[in-house]
Image: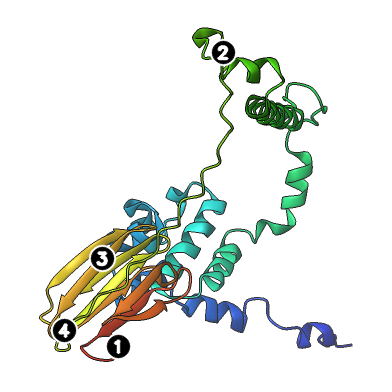
Amino acid sequence: MTIGKSPDRENAPSSAQPSDAAVQAADAPSIGRVLSAARIEAGLTVDQVSTATRVRVPIVHAIEEDDFGRCGGDFYARGHIRSIARAVGVDGEELVARYDDAHGGSPASKRPTQLIDSGPIKVPGRGRPNWAAAMVAAIVAVVALIGFNLVNGKTGHTGTGSASARLPSGSGTGSLAPAPSPTVQPPAPAPSAAAIAAVPADKVTVKLVAEGTSWVSAVDGTGKSLFQNNISDGQDQTFTDGKQIKLVLGNGGAVHAYVNGKDLGLLGKDGQVVHVTYTPGDPQAG
């Protein structure tokens, strides 16, 4: 009597063979290497990425070396990965998904439980001021004060008999002066970006007006750096050269451009890294 091999054991796949997905994941470059290569390809330094994203320089270095321990936890690590990826022009969501696969998955399924179980249940009305009631009381007080001033001013102008009768008599200190009526100052006009004056036809003139915060690098036709810094909401910078002006913007959606006297509007979308070059004549981005 011979014992044959079990069909189930013979046809069962070997557990030692890795899956195709695992082989592809092992061959793919790490998150840090992807961000580092994209930064170098975009022509940005670590200091420039740190300025554009507000992620400290040591943390940017650590992330590019796949050391996420300095981020302060998974939540901050995901945020830093998204910010750096947006600054260097790669898909941050794909990198975050890879981070979640390597560190225990996304916390989305845990978030409702954490919200329910975190901390004791607070009893309404204890240890917390009623800001709504305080605000209503303040509004009522202001309305009452305005009404009092209006009524008092109106009475001073029309008179009640005794006050108006004493005013023409010139009795001096015995007269009641009418209360001044409140005046409402018109709101100050909102500042607008000044248009560029007539510019020479043989030169290129670029004026940048910030409508947010963005890192800006400007280089003239000889390769000389004209400006490298952040500009914030309301600030502006103007650059002129006889050949060309080359710009790199860390946040194109926050920079309004006027080139050779022509309004080009915003140079990109929020968070978009923009590389443009302008020359004399009709402004066409290179």
Question: As drawn, which residue projects farthest toward the front?
Answer: 169
- The kind of residue tagged 1 is Pro
Q: For marks 1 and 4, give the CA distance.
A: 13 Å
Q: Name the foreground residue: 218 vs 184.
A: 184
Q: Is residue 74 left or right of residue 263?
A: right
Where disc 3 sits, the SS reads strand
57 to 151, vertically: above or below: below
First in residue order: circle 2 vs circle 1: 2
Q: Nearer the viewer, residue 257 or 82?
A: 257
Residue on which the image places disc 2: 175
What residue lies at 53% left-to-right and 81% top-to-bottom? Answer: 24
Lower position in the chain sequence, tag 3 or tag 2: 2
**Distance Cα–Cα, label 2 vs label 4:** 69 Å
- Kindly indicate the quadrant of the structure image that contains residue 4: bottom right
The residue under label 4 is 200
Which residue is pictured at 53% across the width and 59% down the height? 78
Percent coordinates x, y for residue 142 in the rendering: 67, 30
Marks 1 and 4, the one that precedes in the sequence: 4
Q: Which mark, residue 237?
A: 3
Q: Give left or right: position of 284 versus 178.
A: left
